[in-house]
Image (cartoon, rainbow, N blue to C red):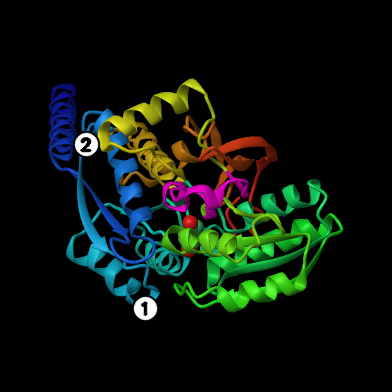
Amino acid sequence: MNTSKMAQRAALSAAILVSAQASLAEEPIKVGMMLPATGTYAKLGNNIKNGFKLYVDEQGGTLGGRQIEYVEVDSEANPAKAIDNVNKLIKQHEVDVLLGSVHSGVALAMAKRAKESGTVLIVPNAGADNVTGPLCAPNIFRTSFSNWQPGYATGQAMAEDGHKTAVAITWKYGAGKEMLDGFKESFEEAGGTVVKELYVPFPNVEFQALLTQIAAAKPDAVFAFFAGGGAVKFVKDYAAAGLKDAIPLYGTGFLTDGTLEAQGADAEGVKTALHYADALGTPRDDAFREAYAQAYGEQPDVYSVQAYDAAQILGIGLEATGGDIANKETFTAAIRNATVDSPRGEFTMSSSHNPVQDFYLREVTDGVNKVVRIASKSLSDPGRGCRMK
Ligand code: PHB
């Protein structure tokens, strides 16, 4: 080939590349939101949607030069419907990104399908340990926590507060059981004993008989996992049963996050461990809280933060690839190597794509989750069963 032909060819392929990039830029990135819009987790789903959209709106509606478009499906926090729902998003709507879910059982189904299909999945809440364990994959990321993490941090805090015996109570499904296991692991490592484990079917809120059992067992403290509407009811029932001043109530932070207005005085003094708190007072968090309150007329919670950061990591991946989400290696590497500037404080991703982050011990004081101390510094999920390095 002579030099002028080579130059012609080069010019032609450059033109094709430019036009491919131009048409890529015209196509929106479709984000399939699979979140609960009904039931005990409805408010959590709403705040995740708000947090994600806030970050995208702050970037002018684009990430990495691509417009962001949303498709929404009500997950109903129902694992039995999860495979159908996620297939609808992948096959019918051909989404580029899956965002979800709140409920661990739903997230497991999403992770399974994401692993098979290669669709990018960002989990903005559900803590199912297996998502960043045996189901881990280069295209699956979590910006929240593994269930083990807040459980483990709460056990550390309870032992450090001097408690030797505890009753644990939770909804009987994956998230509750895994948080309880994390709690038991650190509490027992520190010499504590879990004298009783009590389970309530999800999403039931009939606590009376179990509260009677707690009163009879007289432990030093109680560990609980409930969230959303169920957490509101549990904290109120605990106080009404006369236990609030008799046996200190602890839990993973979901017990008092996004719920304090409804719980009122009954939540005062409840201590929980979580990767976020209400009054961190950092410039980053203050700016986030102000923007969120302006946009939605209410304060954000941990769910809003996790989703804001889900949009941030999508932005990091899209920025690195010039908006080409099909460039999987570059997309994944950019997120793996990132330090995410979260309102909660900076975090990085573990090798299984779960946040390595600080857990705060918080105490409800004058209606806010106030930091008492760091319960666990840079806590990393062990990623048991994940083969990615
Ligand atoms: C979960 O099912 O993983 C889950 C649900 C609600 C929470 C935390 C974890 O607040």
Does the beta carbon at disc 2 come under 8 Å from ligand 1?
A: no
183 versus 325 height, above or below: below
Which residues are drawn in magenta? 255-274
Q: In the rendered view, does 208 fall on the left or right side of 93?
A: right
Q: Which element carries disc 2, helix, strand or loop?
A: strand
Badge 1, how many Cα within 10 Å: few under 14, some, many 20+? few
- Disc number placed over residue 80 in the picture, else none: 1
Q: Which of these two is toward me, 242 or 104?
A: 242
Q: Nearer the viewer, residue 340 or 75?
A: 75
Can you tell which mark lies on residue 66? 2
Tell me the quadrant of the picture where the N terminus can be found: top left
Position of 131 relative to 287 (above/below): below
Report crowding for label 2: few under 14, some 14 to 19, many 20 or more residues within 10 A (C-alpha): many
**Of tags 2 and 1, which is closer to the observer?**
1
The x and y percentages for residue 174 are 54, 70
> Between residues 218 and 332, which one lies in front from this camera angle?
218
Residue 198: x and y in percent read 64, 75
Does ligand 1 reach within 8 Å of label 1's beta carbon?
A: no
Say which amino acid is labelled 1.
Ala
